[in-house]
Image (cartoon, grey):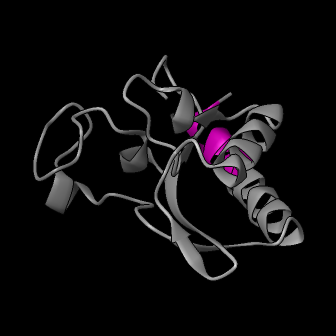
């Protein structure tokens, strides 16, 4: 599967995740989505706060801000984040809540071994 194929599949998966979130009674706003290389450095280069090999740089990662009953959820172990993360994984994505150190608001698609 090419990078372009993955980007198009990822976009559809994100649409499904957003719909699942709202159908579950949650609300979302976008956090980080695409990280422009002019600001964050090209893939493999560290600039600003972005990791050098972030999938945000290749349009395969999105961070969401999660709200439950109007309350902004910051705890990665909150049941709503777990529900979203497990749903995302069922679609074939990688959920940051499983990453070392936790990054529950991160939803990505693996490419060349990177999540």
Quarter of the view holding residue 33: bottom left
15 relative position to 73: left or right: right
Q: Residue furthest right?
A: 23
Q: Residue 8, how many percent across, how many down?
A: 69, 51
Question: Magenta stretch?
Answer: 2-10
Q: Residue 111, how many percent across, how many down?
A: 53, 27
36 relative position to 28: left or right: left
Q: Was residue 9 drawn as part of the magenta stretch in this picture? A: yes
Residue 90 versus residue 36 in the image, above or below: above
Q: Residue furthest left?
A: 47
Q: Residue furthest bottom?
A: 70
Residue 103 versus residue 98 in the image, above or below: below
Q: Residue 10, how many percent across, how many down?
A: 67, 48
Quarter of the view holding residue 39: bottom left
Magenta: main secondary structure equals helix
Q: Residue at x 18, y 53 (%)?
A: 40
Q: Residue 13, how many percent across, how many down?
A: 76, 51
Q: Residue at x 68, y 35 (%)?
A: 93
52 relative position to 31: left or right: left
Q: Nearer the viewer, residue 70 or 36?
A: 70
């Amino acid at each position: 599967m090419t990078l372009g194929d993955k980007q198009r599949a990822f976009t559809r998966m994100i649409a499904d995740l957003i719909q699942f979130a709202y159908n579950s009674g949650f609300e979302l706003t976008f956090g980080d989505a695409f990280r422009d290389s002019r600001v964050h450095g090209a893939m493999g280069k560290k600039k600003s706060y972005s990791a050098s090999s972030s999938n945000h740089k290749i349009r395969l990662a999105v961070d969401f801000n999660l709200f439950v009953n109007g309350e902004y959820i910051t705890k990665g172990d909150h049941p709503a984040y777990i529900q979203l993360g497990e749903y995302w994984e069922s679609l074939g994505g990688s959920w940051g809540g499983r990453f070392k150190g936790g990054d529950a608001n991160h939803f990505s698609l693996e490419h060349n071994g990177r999540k």
